[in-house]
Amino acid sequence: MLRKLILAAVLVVAGTSAGAAATTAVATANVNLRAGPSTAYPAVTVVPAGATFTTHGCVSGYSWCDIGFGPYRGWVAASYIQVIYRGAPVVLTAPVAPVIGITVVSFNRTYWDSYYRAYPWYGRWAAYPPPVYRPYAPPLPVVTSRSGQVNCANGACTATRSATGYYGGATTQTRSCADGSCTATRYTAGPRGGTATRTRNCTAGQGCTATRSAQRW
């Protein structure tokens, strides 16, 4: 249902304003529209689940986004925003936002003055803590290095692959095949010294056997 709503909204926007910078999105659940990018700010209204709205940008780190919902303007946590990415509905995240054209915007007194003068809490701007923006940090690589080689001679082949993890662990796998039989051994050493070994033997017409062993550090 949410996917249909998003696709319909995107088609409407595409047909009316191809050059618009704003992005149409859908609320994944009932969520408060806040007067600032934090739950410390007062609620302007509630955006119901499945409602479409316009996303005008997000703070640095893409944790909160500035949206327009009907006559209202305010901020919603990005985890409640669903957009179309590569033809499928996804929750808005830091890697997705720039790809679909959502830019970084700021929240300041000018924004507050522009949209909240009519609200009873307008005069309490100084009472709310300034927003803390946490810059987006890309995930650490799981593997930092890889290597591999294959050697064949006299009807037999041996292939070796190895990889080293970000935290220091390493895995090496060696596979040898000759005369209808193959043996594969995988040895893994964890970053804290633990080890694990698996050996698999396969013979044509006889099937395969496997043995495993492990030692904790």
Image (tube, rainbow, N blue to C red):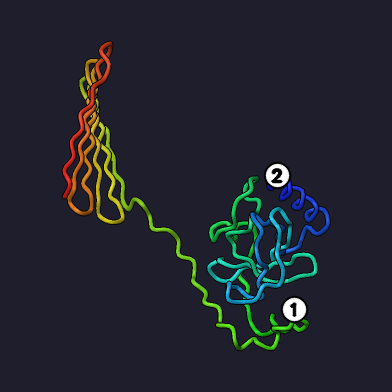
* Residue 182, placed above or below residue 102: above
Question: Total label count?
Answer: 2
Residue 20 x %, y %: 75, 63
> Seen from this angle, which residue lies furthest front?
120
Residue depicted at 23% across the width and 53% down the height: 191
Disc number placed over residue 22 in the picture, else none: none
* Residue 140, placed above or below residue 131: above
Residue depicted at 59% across the width and 87% down the height: 127
Disc number placed over residue 1 in the picture, else none: 2
Residue 54 x %, y %: 73, 62
- Which residue is nearer to you in this view: 100 or 194? 194
Residue depicted at 20% across the width and 54% down the height: 192
Tell me the quadrant of the picture where the N terminus can be found: top right
Residue type, label 1? Tyr
Ranked by sequence position, the earlier of labels 1 and 2 is: 2
Q: Residues within 10 Å of mark 2 (few under 14, many from 20)?
A: few
* Residue 134, placed above or below residue 121: above
Q: Which residue is mark 1?
A: 115
- Which residue is nearer to you in this view: 41 or 25? 41
Q: Is residue 55 visible?
A: yes
